[in-house]
Amino acid sequence: MLDHRLPDEYEALRKTVAEFAHEQVAPVIGGCYEREEFPYDLVAQMGRMGLFGLPFPEDYDGMGGDFFALCLALEELARVDSSVAITLEAGVSLGAMPVFRFGTEAQRREWLPSLCRGEKLAAFGLTEPGGGSDAGATRTTAKVDGGDWVINGSKAFITNSGTDITSLVTVTAVTGQREVGRKDISAILVPAGTPGFAVAPKYSKVGWNASDTRELSFADCRVPEANLLGELGRGYAQFLQILDEGRIAIAAVGVGLAQGCVDECVRYAGERETFGHPIGHHQAIQFKIADMAARVHTARLAYYDAASRLLRGEPFKKEAAIAKLVSSNAAMDNARDATQIFGGYGFMNEFPVGRFYRDAKILEIGEGTSEVQRMLIARQLGVV
């Protein structure tokens, strides 16, 4: 019999993270957001809770859980705030996961324990200023010289790359040219503070204002040749796999934001009065909230399905793209509707829906735009 109820261990995790989000994150995150301040204390608390180690083995100080456990945590965090959720998402699925998936045992032992404990953060340097969705158009180069990789180039929109606890950035770079003219792209580990590796000031962003996002530059940056991550020339393929998994995680963030909009609107509809009645008495408001709840339900089922396929070892590329597309649409639509229901108050940053509205749009862009998701879905369907 098909059963969509969460097993006890997942439900216990969900409740724990929900309690943390409401009791610890909610009271302080508005101030961090307004000041564009990275929430170090909250990150440290998440580290002590084991959230950064959820999908990693205990051998590396992880929690021995799985990727779905991470997604549940992300959904509950994003239900309250997306800056905190994206810090966890990028730290795990983009920062630590490449080391776990493709690193040597020595690389795993060196980097993963502190990342799993949340004491340090890692970042994923793929996107370039002139590249955008065309990640294959990488211009950053890495050449071997005297036992070192010498890296030159730049990366853009890199999350967790410039915090005080950032320890590592994995960078994709052109390391050769194939006979057919295609580039060989490899992944290289660059420790924070390496000479020639510069981190720009934080971007001034529309949303996610309590998260860290920066541009990176590399000028004759030298790291040991042993810092190659995975196979030479396979960096692009490796990170396509990482992005497939990451899309499920971003879908969970989108579902959390969309659900947070429902939560706020249900509460507000019972409190705000117009024409002598709570606005929830008006059918226009009822229908709008009903549509919002339907979007959340559909998007949640989509990411649950993609995650279950991943855990079973089945192909999941199409389902991950569908989940990311549906959930980001739900987040954007719900944020717009929530702002409308709140009226003028929805346009004020002091209300959560104001942050939700500002945070939603990037979900249709980051880790593959909605257009890229449609392209991937069509390809998986055999449409040429």
Image (cartoon, helix red, strand yellow):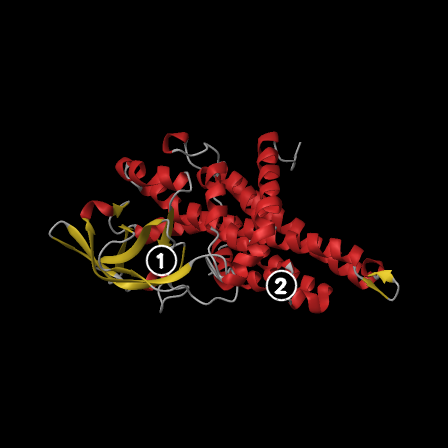
Image location (x, y in percent) of residue 95: 39, 48
Q: Are marks 2 and 1 in contact (CB under 8 Å)?
A: no
Label 1's element?
loop
Residue at position x 45%, y 49% in the image: 40
Q: CA distance from mark 2 to mark 1?
A: 30 Å
Q: Quadrant of residue 226?
A: top left
Nearer the N terminus, badge 2 or badge 1?
1
Which amino acid lies under the numbered mark 2 shown in the image of this protein? Gly
Mark 1 neighbour class, 10 Å CA radius: few under 14, some 14 to 19, many 20 or more: many
Q: Measuring 88% from the left and 63% from the top, which residue is drawn there?
A: 276
* Left or right for 98, reference 317: left
Question: Is residue 383 visible to us here?
Answer: no
Q: Which mark is residue 258?
A: none
Q: Residue at x 44, y 38 (%)?
A: 53
* Residue under the point 80% across and 63% down: 284
2 or 1: mark nearer the eye:
2
Q: Is residue 126 left or right of residue 27?
A: left
- The amino acid at mark 1 is Leu
Residue furthest to the right in view is 276
Instruction: Residue 247 in the image: state x and y as whole percent.
Output: 49, 51
Task: Estimate how packed mark 2 is, as few (under 14), some (14 to 19) or many (20 or more) residues with alpha carbons within 10 Å.
Answer: many
Asked if residue 339 shows in the view, the reply is yes
- Point out residue 210 in the picture as x, y percentages from the top left corner: 50, 57
Q: Which residue is mark 2?
A: 354
Q: Which residue is mark 1?
A: 126
Is 142 placed above or below 231 here? below
Image quadrant where residue 96 sits: top left
Q: Quadrant of the N terminus?
A: top right
